[in-house]
């Protein structure tokens, strides 16, 4: 069982409103989203597009509900844009997170990403970096990770993700080998590893010492198989229900929690399962995940 004094439980707003497909959950307000998070028993949240941009306004709303910001997605373009431009955007995000009291920023390199392209199949069409691009990415992450840690007190965690330049086991390994453990850690996502055909437990064993943030995401393998067979896009898969909350798909999270506990993991584990809220009521699924995690992890 995970140590409640060291590990906290959060949930992402993407179950209520989808930033990549604004029609999903368009009717759900920020206030409804964070109120239902609190009602379901969560203490942490990531940041969605409907969240107030003013840290003082956001902090007041979250304080009322006993919530904190535990991470925010950051889209980097280190291999296609000038480094200085990315650093400027990163500093802005870091300043916001510091004001919110967060200790984590979740990076994802979005150069050439197909995850948001509705007409591009998610399997077999991702961009593969050359050696020069790998160096640009890893050197940039090291520099930004140093800035994040030393100037803002925030850990840069890298989010491997379907459709991006760092998706599978080999790419994750090269990223980990090419970056400094002091400045770059891993955002471990069970769903994205499973979706890409990688055993999430194997990756957990391999990188447990580098993991600073955890996304608990389950998958429905029959939907993933359909996405692959019919050459559908990542967003098509989301609409069809490729993802779901822990305990509702095919992943056994018991061993995941056991390995995290044995390694003394500290930080947030966060439920992140983008679905169509008209088909999967966000509060209902948040409660379902909360009960499953209480049973399996003791949180």
Image: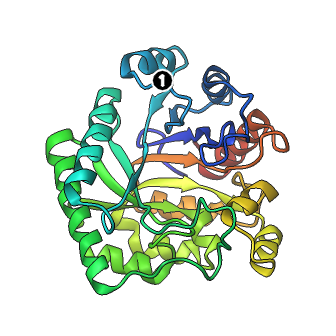
Q: Going by the image, does 231 lie left or right of 58?
A: right
Residue 194 spot, x, y in % from top left = 63, 71
| Residue 184, position as x, y percentages in the image | 28, 61
Instruction: Name the residue at 49% across, 74% down.
Output: 203
Is the residue marked by circle 1 packed among few (<14), some (14-19), or many (20+) residues within 10 Å? some
Quarter of the image with the C terminus in it: top right
Is residue 154 visible to us here? no
Task: Name the quadrant containing residue 242.
Answer: bottom right
Q: Eyeballing the image, is 110 above or below 283?
A: below
- What SS does tag 1 mark? loop
User: 267 or 193: nearer the eye?
Assistant: 193
Residue depicted at 29% across the width and 46% down the height: 90
The residue under the point 42% across, 20% down is 59
Displayed quadrant of residue 93: top left
The residue depicted at 21 percent of the width and 63 percent of the height is 142
State the residue position of label 1.
52
**Residue 32 percent coordinates (x, y):** 67, 22
């Amino acid at each position: 069982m995970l140590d409640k004094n060291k590990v906290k439980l959060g949930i992402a707003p993407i179950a209520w409103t989808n930033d990549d497909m604004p029609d999903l959950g368009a009717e759900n307000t920020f206030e409804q989203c964070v109120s239902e998070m609190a009602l379901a028993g969560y203490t942490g949240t990531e940041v969605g597009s409907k969240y107030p941009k003013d840290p003082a306004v956001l902090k007041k709303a979250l304080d009322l509900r006993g919530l904190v910001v535990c991470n925010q997605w950051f889209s980097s373009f280190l291999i296609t844009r000038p480094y200085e431009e990315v650093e400027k955007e990163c500093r802005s995000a870091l300043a916001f997170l510091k004001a919110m009291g967060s200790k984590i920023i979740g990076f994802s390199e979005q150069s050439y990403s197909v995850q948001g392209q509705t007409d591009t199949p998610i399997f077999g069409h991702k961009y593969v970096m050359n050696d020069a691009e790998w160096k640009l990415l890893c050197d940039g992450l090291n520099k930004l990770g140093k800035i994040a840690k030393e100037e803002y007190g925030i850990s840069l965690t890298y989010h491997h993700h379907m459709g991006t330049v760092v998706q599978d086991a080999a790419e994750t390994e090269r990223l980990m080998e090419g970056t400094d453990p002091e400045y770059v850690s891993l955002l471990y996502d069970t769903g994205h590893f499973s979706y890409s055909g990688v055993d999430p437990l194997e990756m957990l064993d391999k990188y447990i010492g580098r993991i600073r943030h955890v996304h608990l995401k389950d998958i429905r393998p029959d939907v993933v198989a359909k996405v692959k067979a019919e050459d559908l896009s990542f967003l098509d898969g989301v609409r069809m229900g490729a993802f779901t909350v822990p305990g509702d798909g095919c992943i056994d999270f018991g061993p995941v929690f056991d390995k995290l506990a044995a390694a003394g993991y500290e930080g947030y584990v966060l439920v992140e399962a983008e679905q169509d809220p008209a088909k999967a009521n966000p509060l209902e699924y948040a409660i379902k995940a909360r009960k499953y995690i209480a049973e399996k992890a003791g949180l």
